[in-house]
Image (spheres, grey):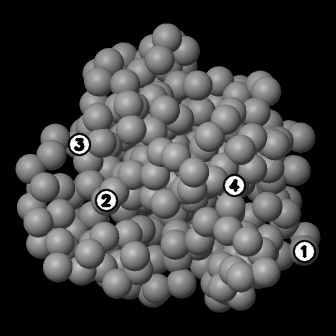
Amino acid sequence: MKPFLILQARPETDASDQEFAAILDKCRLPASRARRIRLDQEALPDDLDLSDYAGVIVGGGPGCVSDDPASKDPVEARIEAQVMGLMPQIIARDHPFMGCCYGLGVLVHHLGGEVSKARYGEPVGPSLCALTDDGKADPLTAGLEPQFEAFVGHKEAVQSLPEGCVHLVRSDPCPVQMVRFGRNVYATQFHPEADATDFENRINIYKNHGYFRPEDAQALITTCHAANVTEPAIILRRFAERYG
């Protein structure tokens, strides 16, 4: 069986390690079925052949595709360039792809949609999402609860969808929560890999990164543990099952 290619954009080792473990856990994949590349430390191989991989999963990160290129952190700019450089192959082949949070911005930006900080940013914590009519029929989301909680936390968001994107999940604070392009290319604004413990870890890691006031960290952790977040992990598991 082919492995999944897992691309990570988090330069913090503890956050990156925790995210990788969470992705494997929610996908129900052994480490032997994954090739992990931390893009802050390792460049994508020039001879990368997507046909060697069952699918590609892009994790989250502190970068924003809508930031002014002239002012981007050099590491974040390098990470973004590598992921963006892979997107033409992903789209041309309709290769299985799951972008998580940051990955949604990458996909929509590549396709010509609008991603910015103008509207729809969400604070760290649970958000109530809902399936669209297309979401009720898609293989990854059909049969899920019509409304479900998911963990979010993002400064930028999709303002307008590019032509050809199928809208699968929405919410009131952030209309575009999950999309599909073609038959096999998916992305979510929420974090399908994250449970309450994962978000507790990230809150502690990122409490000085401008997502929330540091003094609010414990209250956010309490809110996360009080949430009932179950359906997002099913989406990620179905992706791994469908293409693995």
> Which residue in the protein does label 3 denote?
229
> Which residue in the protein does label 4 denote?
106
Few, some or many C-alpha atoms within 10 Å of disc 4 (few <14, some 14-19, many ≥20)?
Answer: many
Quadrant assignment, res 167: top right
Q: Earlier in the sequence, mark 1 or mark 3?
A: 1
Q: How many marks?
A: 4
Q: Is residue 197 left or right of residue 3?
A: left
Q: Earlier in the sequence, mark 4 or mark 3?
A: 4
> Which residue in the protein does label 2 denote?
124
Q: Amino acid at mark 2?
A: Val
Q: Position of residue 74 (x, y in %)?
A: 71, 87
Proximity of marks 2 and 1: CB atoms separated by less than 8 Å: no
Position above or below: 89 against 37: above
Proximity of marks 1 and 3: CB atoms separated by less than 8 Å: no
Q: Amino acid at mark 4?
A: Val
Give the label, 4 or 3, closer to the camera: 4
Q: Earlier in the sequence, mark 2 or mark 4?
A: 4
Position above or below: 33 against 127: below
203 or 42: nearer the eye? Answer: 203
